Amino acid sequence: MRIATNVGAVVAILMLCASFFGWQKIGWFIFVMGVYSGMKRYRREIGGCIGYFRALQAGFQTSFFASLILAFVVYVSATFNPAMIDAALEVFEQRIATSGLQSELIMPQMRNNLTPTMFAASAIFAYCAIGGLVSIVAAFFVKKHLILLNADN
């Protein structure tokens, strides 16, 4: 758990730095490689052998701790910068208008429900979901089983 916390914190900080410079694709690359790195570091700490589900757990924990830090930043940003919510609502309204749905019915409900808390909760959910998917794939490459040799031969 300590490795997941440390790696998750580093991943979140690096993603925030990439986001500050407008490098979103690099931020996602950092996230994917951070989850993978957390799995490999956990495997190394427990002696070099790890099963699929323990590797999956280590990757998900790493993404969870990164998502907590990122969600906190999103919450603080949305609280002190209400224009962030307004910008998200504008994008949402444009997408509704192009899809042909009736925005008069949907937008008032969105304005009431889109709060900094909802922004943070959706960040946690999104990063955990993506981290879980990355972990499912990466665990196949990280798992390593102990091979016992028969001494009788």
Image (spheres, helix red, strand yellow):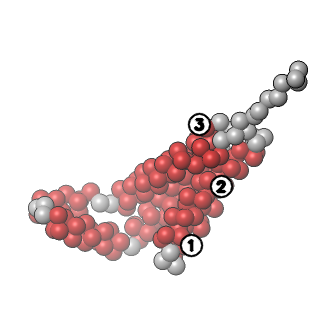
Which residue position holds label 1?
A: 17
Closer to the camera: disc 1 or disc 2?
2
| Residue 23 appears left or right of 51 | left
Q: Secondary structure at mark 2?
A: helix
**Numbered label attached to residue 37:** 2
Residue 52 lies, in percent from the top left, at 61, 38
**Residue occupying the far top of the picture:** 152
Tell me the kind of residue under disc 3: Phe
- Check whether the beta carbons of the residues at disc 1 and disc 2 lie within 8 A of each other: no
Q: Are the two marked residues, 2 and 3, in contact with CB atoms closer than 8 angstroms?
A: no
- Mark 1 or 3 closer to N-term? 1
Residue drawn at (38%, 59%), measured in percent from left and top?
119
Q: Is residue 101 above or below residue 60?
A: below
Can residue 12 be seen at all in this image of the molecule? no
Position above or below: 39 against 52: below
Q: Residues within 10 Å of mark 2 (few under 14, many from 20)?
A: many
Amino acid type, residue under disc 2 in the picture: Ser
Q: Which is nearer the N-term, disc 1 or disc 2?
A: 1
**Nearest to viewer (mark 1 / mark 3):** 3
Q: Mark number for residue 53?
A: 3
Please indicate whether residue 145 sits to the left or right of residue 95 in the image: right
Quarter of the picture containing the C terminus is top right
**Horizontal and vertical percent position of residue 137:** 54, 47
Q: How many badges with numbers are in the image?
A: 3
Upstream in sequence: badge 2 or badge 3: 2
- How far apart marks 1 and 2 lie (CA) works out to 19 Å
